[in-house]
Amino acid sequence: MFKLIPLSAVTSVQGFLAGAINVGMKTKYELDLAILYCEVPCTAAGVFTTNRIKSAPVILSQGHLAKKRAQAIVVNSGCANACVGEQGLADASEMASLAATKLGISPEEVLVASTGVIGVSLPMDRVRAGIKKIELSQREGHSLAKAMMTTDTKPKEGAVQVDEKGVKFSIAGVAKGAGMIHPDLATMLCFIVTDALVDAQFLQSSLKKAADISFNRISIDGETSPSDCIFLLANGLAGNSSISFDNGEAFQEALNEICIHLAKSIAQDGEGATKLIEISVEGALKQAEACLAARTIASSPLVKAAIHGSDPNWGRIVTALGRSGAEVIEDKLDIYLNDTCVMKQGRPAAFNEEEMRMVLGNSDSVLIRVCLNLGNGKASAWGCDLSEEYVTINSEYTT
């Protein structure tokens, strides 16, 4: 039905162009300002940070999305344009106007995203000059991905090609995020595009559902930021009949797939991370309780530290589970590290600790499987280990 292509650029979807430039917000050489543009108007949807402190670009883009239409995104890294007062909103609005003038569209059709240091004003003289110089092409999707990065060590990109009962369309996405990552969005930006024709109400609903099972299931450090946003643009160039609530199952599944791929890429690239941690909870009374348990374990500093040290200390998993709010009956609880059972019916299972330490030490991903054996609820979440490098990165972030 659909095929995931992990390294595809966001511009692999027909009709979308991108361009990026360096204006010195990060370093003298790194790309830090970019535009994503569609050659035709798009139906648009968005999901934003739940942090009560919101950056100026988030406030502006929420307003622009009221009409559920957009045709471009302008993004910068190195400066979050957050907590700088009225000037921040004026600068975000000017970024939209500058991009709109360049592209020959309305400023209300431009979404704005910024990421980086909080409490610093944008260098608008360099932003103005940079937007004018950006050259757009289908080849520059990877450059856009690099221009969004802050402490990321690699871009996060991918695409899904769908062929369902003769209906063909593509969905592609790009994301950034490595720190300040926690469920209910975090310091992450994500832009998703599709050439499918999609009803506006269904587009917003499907994005929210996909975010809930992907970006809202990852945790690196328990922090969220003022800048988080996910934008979804649909241009309709695939020529399909409009996708809506009545016929949107394939679209939803494909969107879920690309969002999970990008979310896992963020978790794997967490600041200082050496291991991806996947939490799988099954047998909960309800799906919501399974989700609560998985998210709590994924965000536990003690669990993350144990995995970093290749320590099969399953007691830390149990205690995180116990405070999650999910229903737990100790005598029914089973826990697995990768394929090894470490706790059976609430008691220690027989396993070779030294062998397990070696397995964990040689793994770049670790699966923690929790079997509550109470019902049919199940859910997954993703995180990463907690290393000394995380402290180093964040102790020197503004220096």
Image: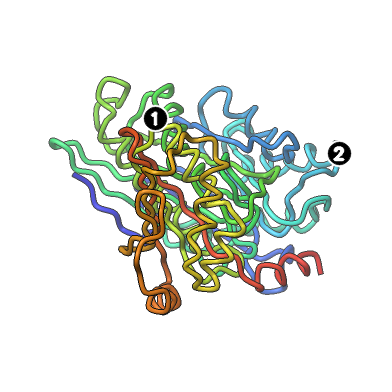
**Residue 85 tag number:** 2
Q: Can residue 19 be seen at all in this image of the molecule? A: yes
Report the number of numbered marks: 2
Q: Using the rendered view, name the quadrant where residue 77 is placed.
A: bottom right
Q: Residue at x 30, y 35 (%)?
A: 251
Residue 33 picture location, percent across and down: 64, 57
Looking at the picture, which amino acid does disc 1 mark?
Answer: Lys
Crowd tier of the residue under label 1, counting other residues whose Cα lies within 10 Å: few below 14, some 14–19, many 20 or above: some
Q: Residue at x 85, y 40 (%)?
A: 87
Looking at the picture, which amino acid does disc 2 mark?
Answer: Gly
Q: Residue at x 30, y 39 (%)?
A: 253
Whether residue 263 sits left or right of residue 199 in the image: it is: right
**Residue 286 tag number:** 1
Residue 354 picture location, percent across and down: 42, 79
- The answer to which of 257 and 42 lies nearer the viewer is 257
Q: Residue at x 44, y 44 (%)?
A: 214
Residue 86 picture location, percent across and down: 85, 36
Asked whether the beta carbons under mark 1 and mark 2 sit within 8 Å of each other, the answer is no
